[in-house]
Image (cartoon, coloured by chain):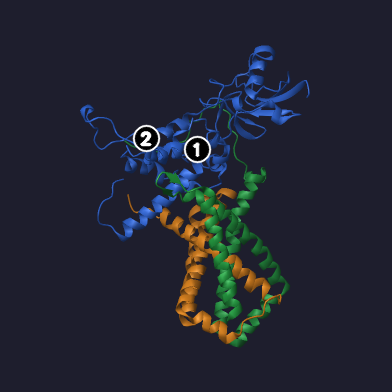
Chain colours: A blue, B orange, C green
Amino acid sequence: MPTNVTLDIFRYRPEDELKPVFQSYEIPFRKDWVILDALNYIKDSLDGSLSYRWSCRMGVCGSCGMMVNGTPVLTCATFLEKFLPGPIRVEPLKNFPVIRDLVIEMSDFMRKLKRVKPWIIRDEEKSLSEGEYLQTPTQLADYKQYSMCINCMLCYAACPIYGLEPSFTGPAAIALAQRYNFDNRDQGKKQRMEALLQDGGIWECTLVGECSVVCPKGVDPAGAIQRYKVASTTEWWKSLLMPWGSREG
Amino acid sequence: MKKPMKPFWWGLFGAGGAISALFIPALLFLNGLAIPLGWIEAPHYEALLALVKHPLTRLFIFALISLSLFHWAHRFRYTLYDGLQLKHLNELVAVLCYGSAMVVTLVAGYTLWRI
Amino acid sequence: MTQNPHYTKHHPKWYRTGMPIFWWMHKWVHMKFILRELTSVAVAFYAVVLLFQVRALSQGPEAYASFLAWLKTPIAIVLHAIAFLFVIFHSVSWFNLSPRALVVRIGKKRIPDAVIAASNYLAWVVFSAAMVWIMLTS
């Protein structure tokens, strides 16, 4: 076991210069440290100017996503040991503008998330006296996988189409739309259609599949998108061959 | 909102992908490698002609050729778009790809009709 | 109230890395993706060859014989061999991805991915065997 390991960290300080640089830090190696521990050590002991996001440090908040040796990961869930002997390259999440150091600008994702209306939509709300909306375990199983998304945006960093096509809604937003489409309490399929089927929607996706590979929660956004493609194509043929009977969205 | 065509092209891509994945490897191996290299004896002309003339065979071959071309058209179009970032040529590429698929479909239909 | 997607506002101090034209050459995973997409060229190649074969068949025994002779030329063999590799890659990647698009649930349990993929492979084997049998017995 080595005693030290080096991290090459992407630094971007726009008040000094508009070009990013890599700065090397040598830190003690501990078997039980994750990348986030290393970053915290650097900030506490070596260089207080390093800026980065983190919160829960246990893989549920989605704040600490960064590129480590070119792969998007949650830094709180990635051990230093995996990258020995180093040096380990740490960069901000790909495909997003960088505000400073390892901090990215995520309003594009937030806008797209809002566009898919990720909430239960009812034609008519039930009154309180009618009781709760019932859901069996089987019905829960239909969408549970897609509800595990923690909005960490690793999938956006991994998706080359998102990098190439700024209007692409992206894996997490589409998976979350499907989370509601498959929820038996929801009646809002039609209202999500425009965001999913128009420019920047599911048809930009070419099933590279990297989004599902990097997802730390097993959401499988690639699968969610493919299922919507199949559903949308079946709907298209149904409405062509059987135009009567307006179907619920 | 006028009827979008994307699901239609994707549907053809999917059907073409499935039919080509299931049938082309064996056909290619037999006709393109095994028979020309002499590993398998070539079927007699009359027997093969009789087999192909059967209406079901004609339908099958037509579907195989046409759907394979539409599978290629859709996939290749997106590969050019993403792989070479030819966004500005988007419409031209689409017309060339789907257009050639349509031409081959017509030729295949005519050939199999008259065989 | 609908919103059109719009590009992130231009902020002069935010740093943006663009995507290079040959982005897919930087990582093997992306290269594999592009190769997978290019299998469609091999598929189209063989579909067109098949069309020519059927056309030759319809034009009489001499035309068919000269087509068979072309199939025996080195260039044809090489093209078919390369196409064969790509077509196999297409089939394998297609069947492996099929469980993503086809989620089937019986009662409470979802059919496992491996079963969906396996049934595709089984169909592949069955159809291929059928074709070999048809060709050998005609």
Residue drawn at point x = 64 percent, y = 22 percent: A17
Which disc number belongs to residue A117?
A: 2
Q: Disc 2: which chain?
A: A
Is the Cβ of the residue at disc 2 closer than 8 Å to that at disc 1?
no
Q: Secondary structure at mark 1?
A: loop
Q: Position of residue A214 (x, y in %)?
A: 58, 37
Q: Quadrant of residue A198?
A: top left
Q: Nearer the viewer, residue A52 or B88?
A: A52
- Mark 1 burial class by Cα count in 10 Å: few <14, some 14-19, many 20+: many
Q: Position of residue B26 (x, y in %)?
A: 60, 68
Q: Quadrant of the N terminus of chain A?
A: top right
Relative placement, left or right, of A90 versus A130 is right
Q: Position of residue B32 (x, y in %)?
A: 65, 72
Image label count: 2
Q: Amino acid at mark 1?
A: Val
Residue drawn at point x = 55 percent, y = 55 percent: C118
**Circle 1 sits on which residue?**
A219
- Mark 2 burial class by Cα count in 10 Å: few <14, some 14-19, many 20+: some
In space, the residues marked 2 and 1 are separated at their CA atoms by 18 Å
The relative height of residue A142 versus residue B26 in the rendered view (above or below) is above
Q: Amino acid at mark 2?
A: Lys
Residue drawn at point x = 63 percent, y = 35 percent: A71
Q: Secondary structure at mark 2?
A: loop
